[in-house]
Image (cartoon, rainbow, N blue to C red):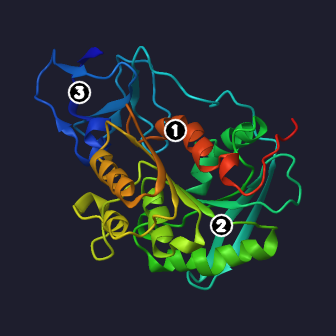
Amino acid sequence: MRVKLKVPDWAVKMVSDHTDMDRNPLRLKAGSGRHIKLSLPDDVYFEYGYIDSGGEMRADPNNPVVAANPWYPALSVLTGPTHKFLGPLVDLPPSSGDLKRYQLHSYHFKARRRFAIFSPDGVGDKPLPIAIVQDGPAFLRIGYLDRIFESLVKAGLAYPVRLVFVEPADRTIEYQFSPTYKSFISQELLPFIDAEIPVEGKPILIGVSLGGLVSATIALEDPDRYQGVVTLSGAFLGTPSNPDPYNSTKSWVLNRIKEGAGSNLRWSLDVGTLEWLLEINRSVQEALDCSGATHRYQEWNSGHNWVSWRNCLTQSIRFSFSPKIFNHKSKRLKN
């Protein structure tokens, strides 16, 4: 679709999925009566906004549709004529499963760490696999992972597992090749869970953006301990010596996969065609192809935001938690 946007007189820069929002804003020529022409896919979900001379990000006053973006609340949205939300989303009722909150004093962090464990409705004390979810509070409050997952379990489209929603203290530091965070997961969190609830099988790791990076790095460092990795817009750039994905052209994750690590894991990768992480995700997918690893990969005409990630979840859950990949038959849970 083709769109012609009228630029507000006060705007000096434009931010959007194309610019990774305010990291690489588009400078606008001064003057009034300005317009920006965009050519976007018909099924697009596109977030954008403007920055004024005071540095404040503001939504488009000519567009009443406001983005539900927790990181950038002052954004507007364009959706193409064929865009669809796939699977259950915001109209889904709250999950009826059990959510228990925990605190664990971490020796490695020398601080208390918080997490929550969600069990789908009807599983009781049955031993189940677990999934470690990075950015846990965001996945609960914004991603609706518990709701979407439980609905798929009840429909017989996903095997019931317990979701462990881990709360980060400083995700930027912890998710970028932090040995402390990796030790916390492997040496403290997983043993605590094994002692607290009945567990079977190997864990699966789930994450968006930097959460996808840390999920991949943890699994690639100890691939025999995990069953699979689910990433949405995985920020696979960076190395332990240069961990910032915004300032690195190298990829430790890509190199490890090319070396043969992680070929025993089940991978699910989703990425937007309008975001800066598209090319590295394509490269990782190609490396997984060459390695023979079981995986799915899908591109969406959208950017780096929670609305897009919610739209990916149904497909990634159905693949990564398919009843067919577990050792015994899945039974549909009663409503």
Residue at image coords 44%, 75%: 178
Q: Which residue is mark 3?
A: 10
Could you say which quadrant of the image residue 143 lies in? top right
As helix, strand or loop, the secondary structure at mark 3 comes to loop
| Residue 307 vs residue 261, the one in the foreground | 261
Residue at image coords 42%, 41%: 72
* Place of residue 43 in the rendered image (x, y in percent of width and height, measured from the top left): 40, 22
Frontmost of labels 3 and 2 is 2
Q: Which residue is mark 2?
A: 202
As helix, strand or loop, the secondary structure at mark 1 comes to helix
Task: Determine the CA span between mark 2 and mark 1.
Answer: 23 Å
Horizontal relation, residue 253 to residue 94: left or right: left
As helix, strand or loop, the secondary structure at mark 2 comes to loop
* Place of residue 227 in the rendered image (x, y in percent of width and height, measured from the top left): 59, 63
Frontmost of labels 1 and 3 is 1
| Residue type, mark 1 in image | Cys
Q: Earlier in the sequence, mark 3 or mark 2?
A: 3
Q: Quadrant of the N terminus?
A: top left
Q: Are marks 1 and 3 in contact (CB under 8 Å)?
A: no
| Residue type, mark 2 in image | Lys
Task: Determine the CA span between mark 3 and mark 2.
Answer: 54 Å
Q: Which residue is mark 1?
A: 312
| Residue 293 vs residue 106, the one in the foreground | 293
Q: Residues within 10 Å of mark 3 (few under 14, many from 20)?
A: some
| Residue 6 vs residue 163, the one in the foreground | 163
Q: Quadrant of the C terminus?
A: top right
Q: Earlier in the sequence, mark 2 or mark 1?
A: 2
Q: Residues within 10 Å of mark 1 (few under 14, many from 20)?
A: many
Q: Earlier in the sequence, mark 1 or mark 3?
A: 3
- Let me know if residue 16 appears in the view: no
